Amino acid sequence: MISLKGKCGRRGEKIFSYACLIPSIVGVLIFFVVPFGIVVRYSVIKNPVTKEYVGLDNYKALVHNTAFRKAARNTAMFSAISVPLAVVLALGLAVLLERKIPGKSAFRTFFLSPLMVPTASVVLVWQVLFHNHGTVNQVAEMFGGEPVDWLKSTKGQVVIILMFLWKNIGYNMILFMAALSNIPRDMMEVAELEGAGAWYKFFHIKLRYLSPTILFVFILSLINSFKIFREVYLLTGNYPYDKLYMLQHFMNNTFNKLDYQKLSAAAVLFALVMIVIMAVLLILENIFGKDVEN
Amino acid sequence: MKKKNILFDVFDNADDRTLRDLSERCKPVDKRTDRRIFAKIQQKCGDASYEEEVYVLKGVDGNMKKNWRKPAMTAAACLLLVGGVIGGAALLKKGGGSSSNGDSYYTSVDSTGEGTTAPEKKEKTVITAAFIFGITDYEKMVNIFNSGQDDYTIKLVDYHKYDVENGTYGEAAMRQLKIDIAAGDAPDIIFTGDHSLINALGSKGTFADLYSFMENDPEVNRDTLLPNVLKAFESSDGKLYSLAPTYQINTMVVKKKFGQKENWSIDDMIAFFDSAPATADHLYDSVTRGWLLEIIVRGMNELVDYDKAECYFDSDEFVKVLEFCNRFAESQNVPEDKAEADAYWRDKVTWTKLDRSPLYMGMIMGYSGTLESEFSSIKYVDFGGEDFTFVGAPTSDGHGGKIEPLGEFAILDTCSDKNGAWQFVRQFFTKETQANHEPGEAPDYKKAFPIQQMRVRKDCFEEWIEQNKYCYEYSDEEQKWVKTDHTYWEHRDTTLYAPTDEELEDYRRYLLSCDTLDNEIAPDIMSICKEEADAYFHGDCTAKQAAERIQSRCSILLSENA
């Protein structure tokens, strides 16, 4: 009798837990699965008017599209430079601020301040700095240098990398500082007692404990690097100079042109690439951080 | 059964909605048909009369009166009643006895012969027509179409309201249209002024080929429409995705003594300016450099190859264009004082005539209904009676005279009844709609679709050329405009003479030789050109750098479309 009651209770609990899951499942379906399904569907039709099925034609056209390839190349180059820099510089600053240095709190606030400034006003400041007659060029000319049209030349990527770092380093730094403070003190004390040097402690202990945070910051920075479109768009519009043309420009412009097929194919391809990158990062984190987590 | 007289004035009591519904269903008839049908009614029932514009039927079953209480039923019952009487036709009189100018409408109905129940309405196919620049000018055409046949109903979709809401000129309307198309809510017919939309969507098979409808159309087809206009609208694959019912020709004009060659290249234009006459003291300030650049870029269709998704802004020719435009003033030197400004403008209109600014830029041709031949007004008003040459906009292909469409129709390929859509669109190209109005008369705005610029029909074009043979003066004796061989423009103190046959033939030949569209350059490309050229004009970069930047940005834009 008791066991039957227990059985009924377990079944009831199961039903109740499934019932509780329904809102989440419905939410995920409505806001993620169904829209993604629609995007996939759009990527295999000729156009939204005729809706004729064309298989992988849109994907084939996309990979041969000069604009897409240019956008992908620029975005990849930007991410490949800016994301590691954002991680390494933020980690370096976090380690630096972990030490007992004067004005530590002021520095922390200083690095976090870009997060509090609205993007539009940030862009205005950067325009003033890097315009053809901007402050940077004026300073360069004062010292006999040649003015550079930063935003309309191959040097444009330097500006947006600087802007990206300025905007993101503070937040990454806070995450690293939090992770550093969570490293077990006894482990560091044992290492010190055993005569481990600063570099050894950093590479063999701190870095191991930081690996999940590094992965998280890396992914976060990678995602943020794709969002640089907003700043570039505000700086240079829909069609920037060659080197500033990012994947988000491509997607935004194809949306404006009603080219939903190209846009959807690009989005699906982009999602696949992101899944692969995430998978590689998770595998790496698993390899390097496994012993520490266990 | 009690018989009583019934006033056959069905609209007299009808509410507005009923009136609108009925007038949409029925096509208007002329007075002659109106009387003919009434004669038939008399013939059939004998006891009918027409009293003060109200039809009176006598001897009709008075029991039907109970069905006539509601205004809508009134109309329906009358349709049936008379349908029964005259054997499948109903006559409705709009305006009633109190109105002196009511229109009559006539429609076919299925007669049951019983006169007790209303006939079932045939289900009409609804065709949606999206208008970017407001629907006001097209409502009459729609009403005529809707009431003229029983198969289709055109439903107007006004996109102009989005412009009104957002304070834009076309942008918000176009954006909403694009969103609707992308959301699968595409209209069946589009009337737009943005040819780049047609270019962008036409290559994706979004629009139907209008040639396919013309093949079976006895009135609107390749033989009745101007071939140069059709060629201008044709896509590279030889299809006609859109067509404008009216257009104008844009060109530059110069006195023959300065240039005999028709349709210049940019080199010809630069050479002309380099060897301008000494009298030309307003050579570079008659127009602004920004305006000139836009005019030149609009005409240089060879700068962009949409099919190959390539552009050639970094060519030496375009660098020359930038450098040439930079010779011109940034703004016109118009005095601030109103009186001085008026004097400036009065003086300016004489600059071409007096060789002070010998190239007339931005000539727009094709207006109808003027009192003088358009040719004569160019010759005598703008060029002081001297012969002139049309030099077009500078291009390398010799097609400088540009056709500027004033709104164009396209039928979407998804339209469930494309033939029905064509039946509506073709109305704008019939002889009736395209007919010229008399010289000296304003366009007939009571007409369903008044056209003031050039017609695309051959016969109407030739008629317009015929009108251009003469000048016109109002005759008090005859109480109308009469043909003369000259006319006097008091405000310009100029006498205009009618053109000779040779002059008119040459003018006609040039107009028919224009077979490329003006402003095929997409608005985004144009705005990039202006932005980068402006940087060059203000000394921020060299012409070569500006051209390279335009090339870089525009090639991205074009390759997105590939």
Image (cartoon, coloured by chain):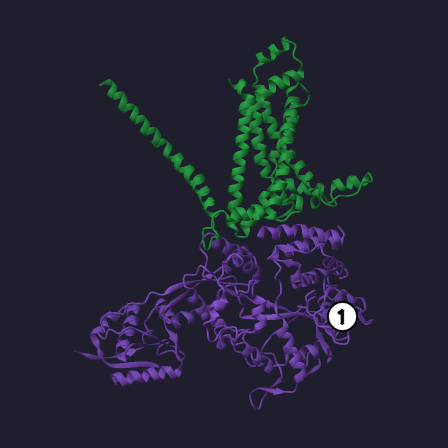
**Among the 4 quarters of the image, the one containing residue B233:** bottom right
**Among the 4 quarters of the image, the one containing residue B395:** bottom right
Q: Residues within 10 Å of mark 1 (few under 14, many from 20)?
A: many
Colour chosen for chain B:
purple
**Horizontally, is B150 left or right of A77 in the view?**
left
**Horizontally, is B391 left or right of B279 in the view?**
left
* Numbered disc 1: secondary structure: loop
Q: Position of residue B284 (x, y in %)?
A: 77, 65
Q: Position of residue B394 (x, y in %)?
A: 70, 66
Relative depth, front residue between B308 and A41: B308
Quarter placement of the N terminus of chain A: top left
Residue B407's place in the image compared with A45, above or below, is: below
Numbered disc total: 1
Q: Chain of mark 1?
A: B
Residue B490's place in the image compared with A78, above or below, is: below
Colour chosen for chain A:
green
- Which residue, as the protein is rendered here, is positioned at the far left? B1
**Horizontally, is A40 left or right of B500 in the view?**
left
Query: Residue at (52%, 31%) from the top-left corner?
Result: A279
Q: Position of residue B23 (x, y in %)?
A: 38, 71
Residue that badge 1 annotates: B357
Let me know if residue B28 appears in the view. Answer: yes
Relative depth, front residue between A191 and B205: B205
Query: Residue at (45%, 46%) from the top-left corner?
Result: A41
Let me know if residue B452 appears in the view. Answer: no
- Which residue, as the protein is rendered here, is positioned at the far top? A193
Callout 1, which amino acid? Ser
Query: Residue at (62%, 59%) from the top-left corner?
Result: B521
Q: Position of residue A286 (x, y in %)?
A: 53, 24
